[in-house]
Amino acid sequence: MTLSTELHVLKVFVGADGGGGNPLGVFLDGGAISAERRQAVATNLNFSETVFVDDTAPGKLQIFTPAAEVPFAGHPLVGTAWLLKREGHAVDAVRPPAGEVPVRFDGDTTWIRGRPEWSPKMEFVQYDSPAEINALTGSPDGIGFAYCWAWEEEPAGHVRVRVFVPEHNIFEDEATGSGAVAFAAHIGRAITVNQGVGSLLLTELHDDGAVSVGGAVALADSRLYTIG
């Protein structure tokens, strides 16, 4: 059966100059797409993640990479929270399979609060300088989820980051919210992340071990998506 439903394409964690931002596909009427079709749709769209919102009121949703469903991911949750508010469905939490994720809005910054243990397993690979990060041509050999980083300004907590996720068919992820959550918890301090070609991610640590990640979001496109 052929169906058409609206697809919103967002850029999440946009930099201060409007550059960067990780593309994200969101179907607010995700219930129109059966569970059996969702992975094929996400694979076809080939964004690093695609979100299917099953119920806008509680913010219940599923997240798929081009290769698999994931229970928690930062840029999909930040982007979807922003879009729900924009479309008149402001929520105080979103609910992926991992659990309830509180949401807050501070000016142009949308924040979500997650648990580091919800983030996928990744390896933190430190380099000596941002120049070495910029020179990378792919994931270090044998690493399926590589969070490659170097200090830009250590006293200020500024880091230069690039992330490669070949295990999910993502050569390079432009902005990785779950990575920022896990990494901030790993080093035990709030960080500001300059990732990819110009994405900006902010973090905050909480006494209960949770980490908030936030950033700016922009709408890139809205269009009908037809599923054959």
Image (cartoon, rainbow, N blue to C red):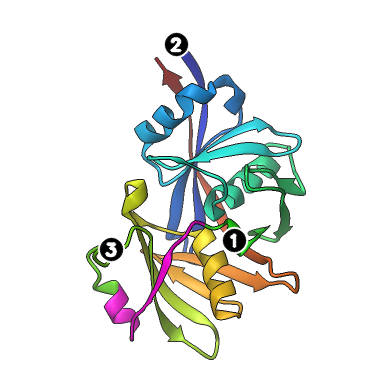
- SS of the residue at dot 1? helix
Identity of the residue furthest to the bottom in this view: 155
Instruction: Confirm whether residue 31 shows in the render.
Output: yes
Q: Quadrant of residue 46?
A: top left
Q: Amino acid at mark 3?
A: Ser
Instruction: Confirm whether residue 214 shows in the render.
Output: no
- For the point 40% across and 28% down, which residue is it? 40
Query: Which residue is under mark 1?
Result: 117
Checking the image for residue 139, the label placed there is 3
Q: Amino acid at mark 1?
A: Glu
Q: Position of residue 124 (x, y in %)?
A: 42, 72
Q: Which residues are magenta?
A: 120-133
- In primary-sequence order, the first of circles 3 and 2 is 2
Checking the image for residue 2, the label placed there is 2
Label 3: how many Cα within 10 Å (few below 14, some 14–19, many 20+) = some
Left/right of residue 105 with respect to residue 163 in the rendered view: right
176 or 216: nearer the viewer: 176
